[in-house]
């Protein structure tokens, strides 16, 4: 295996595997020595890749935009087209526009044969029922979620009862009929799910809950899965 090919393969492993990736795992997957892995990590850093971590703690690829692109397999390209076209249908206005823009950018950057496949893809995404339109600025909600700061909003429940909520936003889930915010509600002191089309008057607060978003989201999803499993038990 040439050094160039080995570096590309290492980069692909860092992109694909859940971080942090241990040097031993990389060595086993690539069938090389630990010493080679450490040397190649430093080589990638020298080429401009931002790789966090060190021996004994594992490595996380932060940014590799300065490196030559590896390109896409045909099936990967089909998956991208299908996913982005579905986002264009179910996403909020900003995400829908971003999905369409991303498709144009991908088509301009892949080889001509793949650009043709992308333009005339055999896969598409259609929905007979689009999710209800959000009544808040979802871009502001996404930004607050990424930055791990609480938000405040008015919420109308299924019985049209209006309450004021301050929550820790954890993630947004796009379902068939409704787009939902997963959150920790300070009013109820528990996990709650809110429909975006029932939220109004969204405000960002100065209350930070960093660095707890990921762990809280994991707990919320585990509870949802447990509830679903109980519902399907015979």
Image: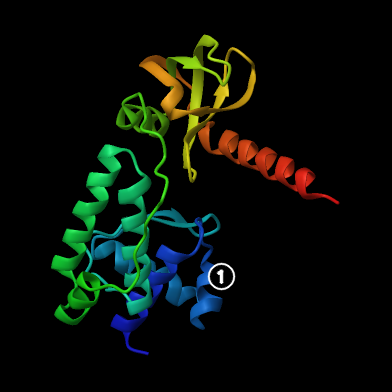
Q: Could you tell me which residue is drawn at 35 percent across and 43 percent down?
A: 91
Please determine whether, in this image, residue 41 is positioned above or below residue 183.
below
Please determine whether, in this image, residue 217 is positioned above or below residue 98.
above
**In the visual, does 150 lie left or right of 11?**
right
Give the residue at mark 1. Answer: 24
Q: Nearer the viewer, residue 57 or 9?
A: 9
Residue projecting furthest to the right:
234
- Percent across and percent down for residue 117 are 24, 77
Q: Could you tell me which residue is drawn at 24 percent across and 71 percent down?
A: 118
Q: Could you tell me which residue is drawn at 36 percent across and 72 percent down?
A: 76
- Quarter of the image for residue 223 reads top right
Residue projecting furthest to the bottom:
1
Q: Residues within 10 Å of mark 1 (few under 14, many from 20)?
A: some
- Percent across and percent down for residue 140 are 32, 27
Q: Could you tell me which residue is drawn at 50 percent across and 60 percent down?
A: 55
- Percent across and percent down for residue 21 are 51, 61
Please determine whether, in this image, residue 95 is positioned above or below residue 120.
above
- Percent across and percent down for residue 152 are 43, 15
Q: Secondary structure at mark 1?
A: helix
């Amino acid at each position: 295996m040439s050094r160039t090919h080995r570096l590309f393969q290492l980069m692909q492993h860092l992109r694909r595997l859940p971080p942090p990736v241990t040097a031993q795992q990389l060595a086993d997957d690539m069938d090389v020595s630990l010493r080679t892995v450490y040397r190649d990590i430093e080589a990638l850093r020298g080429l401009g890749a931002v790789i966090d971590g060190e021996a004994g703690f594992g490595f996380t690829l932060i940014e590799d935009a300065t490196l030559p692109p590896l390109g896409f397999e045909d099936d990967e390209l089909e998956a991208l087209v299908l996913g982005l076209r579905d986002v264009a249908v179910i996403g909020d206005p900003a995400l829908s526009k971003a999905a369409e823009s991303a498709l144009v950018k991908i088509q301009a950057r892949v080889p001509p044969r793949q650009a043709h496949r992308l333009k005339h893809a055999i896969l598409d995404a259609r929905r007979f029922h689009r999710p209800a339109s959000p009544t808040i600025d979802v871009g502001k909600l996404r930004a607050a979620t990424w930055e791990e700061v609480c938000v405040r909003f008015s919420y109308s429940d299924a019985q049209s009862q209006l309450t004021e909520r301050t929550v820790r936003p954890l993630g947004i889930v796009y379902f068939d009929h409704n787009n939902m915010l997963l959150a920790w509600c300070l009013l109820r002191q528990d996990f709650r799910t809110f429909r975006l089309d029932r939220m109004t008057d969204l405000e960002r607060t100065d209350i930070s809950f960093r660095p707890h978003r990921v762990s809280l989201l994991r707990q919320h999803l585990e509870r949802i899965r447990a509830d679903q499993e109980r519902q399907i038990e015979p």
